[in-house]
Amino acid sequence: MNQDELLRQQAKTREQRFLNLMEQEFNYPPKIAKAILTEAQDCLLGHSTTLKPGQMRVILLSRNAQHGRCLTQTVTQEVTWTVNAGKEDQEIEKQHGLAALRQTRIQRLLNEAVEQGAVATQEDLAHTLQVSVRTIKRDCATLQQQGIYLPTRGNLRGIGRGQTHKAQIVRRWLLGETYDQVAYHTRHSVTCVQRYIQTFVRTLQLHQKAFTPGEIGLALQIGIPLVKEYLAVYQQNDTPFCRQRLAEQTARLSETPLQLKRGPQ
């Protein structure tokens, strides 16, 4: 196909039809028309990132959205939620029951939302987990009675950020609990606890190498708020005993070195 034929084919695409409509009917400059097309494709078609089994995309309110405005006028954000974590969720259900599994999913979804720049309501959780809002409220009350901070839209309004379940898990381990004890007390799977602790230790390793929170988040594929939370847990519990725990865990992780990729300086 020569250049002229290629141009004629491109002129017949849906994208070009949309651009022509924006430029000719609405008098938008070509650059603005292309920007509108890109935004429209993102909103209507979603991102091209392949979803893993158990994941789904949802539209939530942006973390920076102002309160008190009509929802139709509020900025939204598309996020990927891990509704079913597979084997980990099966392990939690087997050991602790359906209620504990649902409560674990509530914590996971809320934190995934915040890490991706969004915030969820109890209605969002109820719709995704296919339960009533009353059930979600009851589960949230149970978790909060255990001292677990839940970053819902209501909790984030007008108050500082509390300590999430991931930070509480690594803190329990740092203070001497075993994997099994942490899993039992927090109703998480041992596999999940191990992963959180490994990420916590990796975070400290990169911090000691002068990586910024943004670079750490990029290297470990976690949100900057979680990076800062992990660093705060360490600073609040910087004792000889805790340093020894970290040294032992670091020695274990050194057998599987992390491949790092730093962003632009």
Image: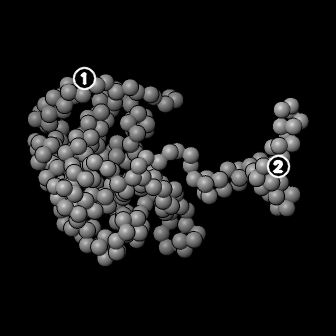
- Which residue in the protein does label 2 denote? 12
Residue 240 image label: none
Classify residue 185 as left or right of residue 200.
left
- Callout count: 2
Q: Residue at image x 11%, y 42%?
A: 178
Q: Which residue is drawn at 48% across and 69% down?
A: 67
**Residue 162 is at least partly visible in this image:** no
Q: In which quarter of the image is residue 45?
A: bottom right
Quadrant where the image shows the N terminus: top right
Local packing at callout 1 (Cα closer than 10 Å; few below 14, some 14-19, many 20+) is few
Q: Which colour scheme is used?
A: one colour
Q: In this view, does 86 lie to the left or right of 186?
A: right
For mark 1, what is the residue?
255
In the rendered view, would you say 75 is above or below 208? Answer: below
Q: Residue at x 52, y 57 (%)?
A: 77
Image coordinates for residue 236, horizontal then vertical, percent: 21, 44
- Quarter of the image where one finds residue 224: top left
**How many other residues sit within 10 Å of disc 2, few (<14), some (14-19) or many (≥20)?**
few
Question: Real-space Cα distance between discs 1 and 2?
Answer: 56 Å
Residue 261 can be seen in this image:
yes
Residue type, mark 2 in image: Lys
User: Could you tell me residue 111's position as x and y percent?
Assistant: 36, 54
> At 71% from the left edge and 52% from the top edge, which residue is drawn?
37
Q: Is residue 153 above or below residue 190?
A: below
Q: Name the amino acid type tagged 1.
A: Glu
In terms of secondary structure, where does tag 2 sit? loop
Q: Which of marks 1 and 2 is nearer the N terminus?
A: 2
The kind of secondary structure element at disc 1 is loop
